[in-house]
Image (cartoon, rainbow, N blue to C red):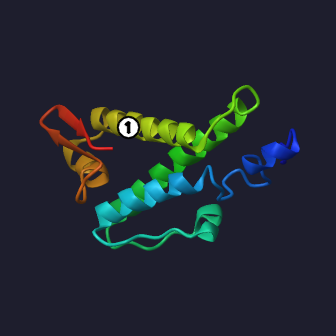
Amino acid sequence: MRYVHSVDDRRLYSTDFLAVNEYVRPLWNLVETWTSAAVGKPVSINDEAAIFLQYPTFQNQFHLHQLQILRGELKLVVWIQRKKYDKVNLTAEDIQRLFIHYVQVRIRADFLRLDEITFGQLSCQGNPPMASAAGRVLFLYI
């Protein structure tokens, strides 16, 4: 479906709401940075991979799970911000701030619901990690 309200709105609204543009590319850059830190080597997600969900293969299955979780949060943020765009003038920084917030909320929820080992494999990998846990205390680094 296409949601174009004016010519100026085409930057954010497109046939594919995940189309990589000045609003969405910074979010994918964060996903690349966080995934690269977890994997321990550079991970690049080009525009086609972002749109068509063609991701790199990983030796550790939890890296793919992390990437899929981040992609899900990214899609949610982009979709929510599209709905707000009619009412306020959003910037790429606004969308990026919301994305980081949603990822932090997801990490907190995972910390509460997952066992220590699974949580550690999803969110505490890499240098720097997205989070770490000491017993029942959570530390966020994003």
* Image-quadrant location for residue 31: bottom left
Image spot of residue 39 (x, y percent): 31, 67
Q: Residue furthest left?
A: 135
* Mark 1 crowd level (few <14, some 14–19, many ≥20, 10 Å Cα): some
Q: Nearer the viewer, residue 91 or 71?
A: 91
Residue 78 image position (x, y, % from top left): 62, 43
- What quarter of the picture does the C terminus occupy? top left
Judging from the image, what secondary structure is the residue with disc 1 in?
helix
Which residue shows up at 41% across the image and 70% down it?
Answer: 43
Q: Quadrant of residue 126?
A: bottom left
Q: Could you tell me which residue is drawn at 25 percent across and 57 percent down?
A: 125
Q: Is residue 76 above or below residue 29?
A: above
Quadrant for residue 63, please give it: bottom left
Q: How many marks?
A: 1
Residue beneath the point at 71% across and 50% down? 17
Question: Would residue 22 be found to the left or right of residue 28 on screen?
Answer: right
Depth order, front residue of 64/85:
85
Q: Which residue is mark 1?
A: 104
Tag 1: amino acid? Gln
Please report the residue visible at 71 percent of the width from the left and 33 percent of the height from the top: 83
Instruction: Using the image, determine if residue 136 lies above or below residue 37.
Output: above
Q: Is residue 41 left or right of residue 79?
A: left
Residue 11, x across and y down, in percent: 74, 50
Q: Is residue 16 left or right of residue 127?
A: right
Residue 81 locus on image (x, y percent) = 64, 36
Q: Outermost residue, top direction?
A: 87
Please tell me whether residue 46 is drawn above or below residue 136 in the rendered image: below
